[in-house]
Image: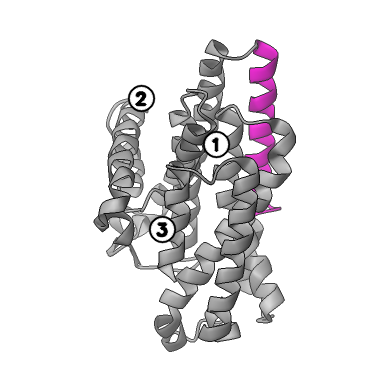
């Protein structure tokens, strides 16, 4: 895995361990050990890159206000993991494996998997509330409440019917395989969760709320570049499976790489405007460039 094995990304490896330690602590807060809690734990420790929780932490570090966004980062991972559990279900994508391990509904059962997904969503909202209360060290009660209200609005929108939920619906049932429709599916299903990470990281890290539109634009270009790289990587496998929702298959490899480079250029321009073009955040942009 590039993110962990290259020396210049060793900072991410350290950060990943800290995130996973915090996840373990949060699992302990979920009450006594039982099968449902075990299912939640299995799904959270199923080998992910932790990009979505890393993003808010790196944004906070670049804002340099010493706001602790750990709980917000965990919330981003919880929302993402909940979506993966749902996507893998037999009634959805019917995936047997997730990162070379059995899908949650096969490791446990379908009912437990659905309930684990519900549990992660509700726990994600609870983490945002906890993080808002921690901001009282730096901000007024009114400011903290405003951030929490905006966070709830953002997650509800981008994880719900205007975002990832409808994206999955389109992925399952759309018969339109045009480039434009594929981009809409990707935006709603994948990019929307990156939007959550960027926007929440910016808000809870102490960023100027007037710049949220710019932050959203950055997250779009990041998410699109990430998905193009992922589709290029899956090109041969998706061709064998006759999978149509793949940008690289739709455009061809050469044009897809051109689109990828264009997204990176746009991303860098916005990150410079936001002051996020410095270490450690620019390492994640560098990682993204090397994916394709």
Mark before the other along the chain sequence, 3 or 2: 2
Report whether residue 190 is seen. Answer: no
Q: Which residues are magenta?
A: 141-164
Which x, y percent locates residue 135? 55, 18
> Which residue in the protein does label 1 denote?
201
Q: Are marks 3 and 1 in contact (CB under 8 Å)?
A: no
Q: Residue at x 71, y 75 (%)?
A: 180
In the picture, the quarter occupied by the N terminus is bottom left
Quarter of the view holding residue 215:
top right
**Is 47 within the magenta?**
no
**Distance from Cα at disc 3 to Cα at disc 1:** 19 Å
Mark before the other along the chain sequence, 3 or 1: 1
Nearest to the observer: residue 283 or residue 20: 283
From this view, report whether residue 78 is shown above or below residue 163: above
> Which residue in the protein does label 3 denote?
287
Quarter of the view holding residue 190:
bottom right
**Distance from Cα at disc 2 to Cα at disc 1:** 23 Å
Q: Which mark is residue 29?
A: 2
Dominant SS of magenta comes to helix
Which x, y percent locates residue 74? 44, 36
Nearer the observer, disc 2 or disc 1?
1
Q: Residue at x 44, y 42 (%)?
A: 279
Q: Residue at x 28, y 47 (%)?
A: 10
Q: Is residue 135 left or right of residue 220?
A: left
Q: Residue at x 37, y 28 (%)?
A: 30
SS for tag 3?
helix
In the picture, the quarter occupied by the C terminus is bottom left
Nearer the observer, disc 3 or disc 1?
3
Nearest to the observer: residue 109 or residue 72: 72
């Amino acid at each position: 895995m590039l993110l962990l094995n290259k020396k210049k990304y060793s900072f991410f490896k350290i950060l990943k361990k800290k995130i996973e330690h915090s996840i373990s602590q949060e699992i302990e807060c979920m009450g006594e050990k039982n099968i449902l809690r075990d299912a939640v734990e299995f799904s959270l420790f199923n080998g992910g890159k932790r990009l979505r929780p890393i993003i808010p932490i790196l944004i906070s570090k670049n804002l340099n206000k010493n706001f602790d966004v750990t709980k917000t980062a965990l919330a981003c991972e919880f929302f993402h993991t909940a979506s993966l559990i749902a996507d893998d279900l037999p009634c959805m994508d019917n995936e047997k494996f997730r990162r070379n391990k059995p899908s949650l509904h096969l490791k446990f059962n379908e009912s437990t998997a659905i309930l684990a997904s519900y549990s992660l969503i509700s726990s994600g909202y609870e983490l945002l509330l906890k993080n808002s209360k921690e901001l009282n060290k730096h901000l007024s009660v009114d400011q903290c409440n405003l951030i929490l209200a905006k966070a709830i609005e953002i997650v509800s929108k981008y994880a719900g019917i205007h975002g990832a939920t409808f994206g999955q619906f389109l992925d399952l049932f759309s018969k339109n395989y045009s480039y434009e429709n594929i981009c809409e599916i990707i935006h709603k299903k994948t990019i929307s969760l990156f939007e959550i990470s960027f926007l929440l990281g910016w808000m809870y890290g102490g960023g100027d709320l007037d710049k949220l539109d710019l932050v959203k634009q950055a997250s779009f270009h990041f998410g699109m570049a990430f998905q193009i790289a992922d589709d290029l990587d899956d090109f041969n496998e998706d061709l064998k499976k006759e999978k149509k929702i793949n940008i690289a298959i739709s455009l061809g490899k050469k044009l897809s790489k051109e689109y990828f480079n264009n997204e990176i250029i746009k991303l860098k321009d916005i990150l410079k405007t936001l002051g996020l073009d410095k270490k450690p955040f620019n390492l994640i942009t560098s990682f993204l460039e090397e994916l394709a």
